[in-house]
Amino acid sequence: MFQTIGIAGSGLMGTAIAEVNILSKFNIILFDSNSEQLNKAQKRISSRLNKHKQDGIKNGRINYVSDISLFKSCDLVIECVTEDEKIKARLLDQIGRIIHKHTILATNTSSISINRLSNSTKNPANFIGLHFMNPPQIIKLVEIIPNNKTDIQIVDNIKDYVAKLNMQFVISDDQPGFIVNRVLIPMINEAVHALESGLSDVQSIDKALKLGANFPMGPLQLADFIGLDTCLYILQILIKDFENPKYKPCHLLEDYVRQGKLGRKTGEGFYKY
């Protein structure tokens, strides 16, 4: 079973995935080429882990590194950089040249084709999609997406790994958006359309879905947590791959992204943080 997990990318998602792994007593190597971003991640994780220590929870260890070659010692490496296919493909190629042939390489993409990304890896049989929901500390679900060449033993190993995180999994075919975002993101887009049309205000739309549909979080607040840029990017993938106008992004969503109002990570989206 895995002992050391590598995480490539120390943004909000990378640090959150690192945290859930540490709390499950895995040792972590968190890599980022941006030292400023890495320092922010260290402060954020240290603060949260100190709270867990006060509760008597024993953790794994974490090393913050800017040297990608240190992934050589990992049993599993999870790529967690921005949802951009070219950036991900370039990084996966770089990691694939470093890790051992038995190391599993995973991507946390929320929508990009696993088969396409596998073309950038040295060993597609050991490559898999591993989509954590945001925030993974609260939403205990992982989508597992094999590519056409993924070894069945790799899938079984990843199932066991997810269970060690005390999380649930679903297996998805490699189709745009996988399961969750195929259903969720168009719903968020419709909520933005409702806001744009003047149907109601942000708080009322979210309240209606929370109370009327038993959602734990309203769609506009959830969009802020996901990142409005990520929501837009997923819609662009859906409309491109399915060639269906029902996935066309709402103009208001595009406007927010243009203005840099991306949600929680920038301090403002549909809400202010």
Image (cartoon, rainbow, N blue to C red):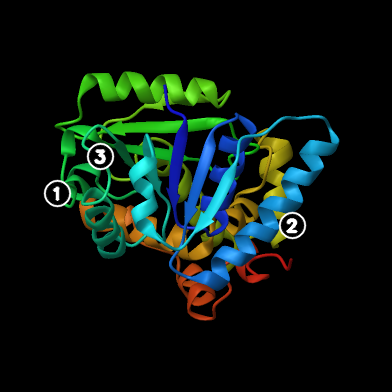
Residue most toward the right?
A: 54
Q: Amino acid at mark 1?
A: Asn
Q: Quadrant of the C terminus?
A: bottom right
Q: Is residue 136 above or below residue 58?
A: below
Closer to the observer: label 1 or label 3? 3
Distance (Cα) linking label 3 and label 2: 50 Å
Please, what secondary structure does the residue beneath circle 3 have? Answer: loop
**Looking at the image, is mark 3 or mark 2 earlier in the sequence?**
3
Distance (Cα) linking label 2 and label 1: 44 Å
In this view of the protein, can residue 115 be seen by the observer? yes
- Across and down, in percent, residue 155 comes to 30, 23
Q: Are marks 1 and 3 in contact (CB under 8 Å)?
A: no
Between 197 and 13, the one nearer to me in the picture? 13
The residue shown at (50%, 73%) is: 257
Taking the image as shown, residue 197 lies to the left or right of residue 215, namely: left
- Across and down, in percent, residue 50 comes to 78, 45
Q: Residues within 10 Å of mark 3 (few under 14, many from 20)?
A: some
| Numbered circle sitting on residue 119 | 1
| Numbered circle sitting on residue 100 | 3
- Across and down, in percent, residue 197 comes to 56, 66
Which residue in the structure is indicated by mark 2?
203
Taking the image as shown, residue 39 lies to the left or right of residue 177, namely: right
Residue most toward the bottom?
A: 259
Between 45 and 241, the one nearer to me in the picture? 45
